[in-house]
Amino acid sequence: MPVNIVILDGYTTNPGDLSWDWLSAYGDVTVYDRTPRGKIAERTRDADVVVTNKTPLTKAEIDAMPRLRFVALLSTGYNVVDGAYLREKGVPVSNIPAYSTTAVAQLVFAFLTAFANRVALHAEAVRAGEWCRCPDFCFWKAPLSELSGKTLGIIGFGKIGQKVADIAEAFDMRILASSGHETDQSHRKNFSWATTKEIAAQADFITLHCPLTDKTQGLVNAEFLARCKKTAYLINTSRGPVVDDRALADALNAGRIAGAGLDVLSVEPPKPDNPLLTAKNCLITPHIAWAAYETRARLLGIFKENIEAFCSGHPIHVVN
């Protein structure tokens, strides 16, 4: 039976380089690039299937969808919808699991190598003519370092955390990992399980890969940062609210840690007064770890599987 499918915020997932055309095989499709909060009810009134990435679906919005039978997420995280209320109403919610593992791990090491090699800093200096004026065959404007032998602390050791560990092994780094579910990692060299306090105190680089929960919200706060080495770098490609923005900005500006690489912030897009936007030694990218063409194409492939499974009466990747 054909269904009425409404995509509330399709632009970031598919700004035009991929295709929604295949969805028409399942029913009528309406794609909105973005949906303001006040337009959700109007746009989903006749929807059987609502598709969202970051547009929230609270109890109020859900109650205004009399035909709703399925919510398909364009993300791994699912806190944007009221899953418990949807479960009460018998509406399954399916997410997109494990589509961005490689891409996120890649950005982690883009940040790590940015701090270790200072490529942008030196490329800009060369463009400004500093090498042409240099009396020597080379120069450097900031200390450079090797990743080999450094300690990488990984907080959250799911698929992404493990992929990061795989790459760290290739760089011959020592790995400390924290997880609520410790598994056998005896195949790894230079690996140890550790507490978050131990990671804060010992790691040269700390990378966050934990979900956002009541326990992890604000995990990186002033107390955590006070334990860190002054030479340590923090990387966050998980969820913005895991980090206390003000505490991190204060630590950076005071030189209590060496730098931070952030792909996520507590509020996105950030407010202009977010203190991290002007903090010292803070590299911020606009939530792009997932944005490579190949990654988004993989996401849509899993989304297609979710739609097919729902239409066949057997939803998969259900998270509520």
Image (tube, grey):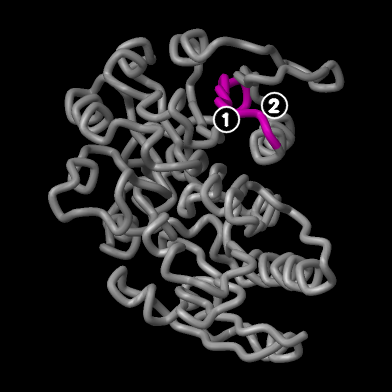
Which residue is pictured at 69% across the width and 26% down the height? 172
What kind of residue is marked 2? Asp
> Which image quadrant for residue 140?
top left
> Which image quadrant for residue 181?
top right
Which residue is pictured at 46% across the width and 23% down the height? 215
Which residue is pictured at 63% across the width and 21% down the height? 179
Taking 62 as reference, is 257 left or right? left
Seen as rendered, the residue at the extreme left is 273
Q: Which residue is mark 2?
A: 172
Looking at the picture, does residue 242 appear above or below residue 203?
Answer: below
Q: Quadrant of the N terminus?
A: bottom right
Q: Position of residue 112 (x, y in %)?
A: 50, 39
Q: CA distance from mark 1 to mark 2?
A: 7 Å
What kind of residue is marked 1? Leu
N-terminal-most mark, 1 or 2: 1
Let me know if residue 156 is in the magenta part.
yes
Which residue is pictured at 37% across the width and 43% down the height? 139
Secondary structure at numbered mark 2:
loop
Taking 49 as reference, is 270 left or right? left
Q: Position of residue 12 (x, y in %)?
A: 47, 72
Let me know if residue 188 is in the magenta part.
no
Residue 95 appearing in the image: no
Q: Identify the magenta region.
A: 148-158
> Which image quadrant for residue 296?
bottom right
Secondary structure at numbered mark 1:
loop
Discs 1, 2 touching: Cβ within 8 Å: yes
Q: Position of residue 53 (x, y in %)?
A: 50, 64
Question: Which of 230 and 317 lies nearest the eye of the viewer?
Answer: 317
Give the crowd class for mark 1: few <14, some 14-19, many >=20 residues within 10 Å. some
Q: Which residue is mark 1?
A: 147
Question: Which of 244 and 33 lies nearest the eye of the viewer?
Answer: 33
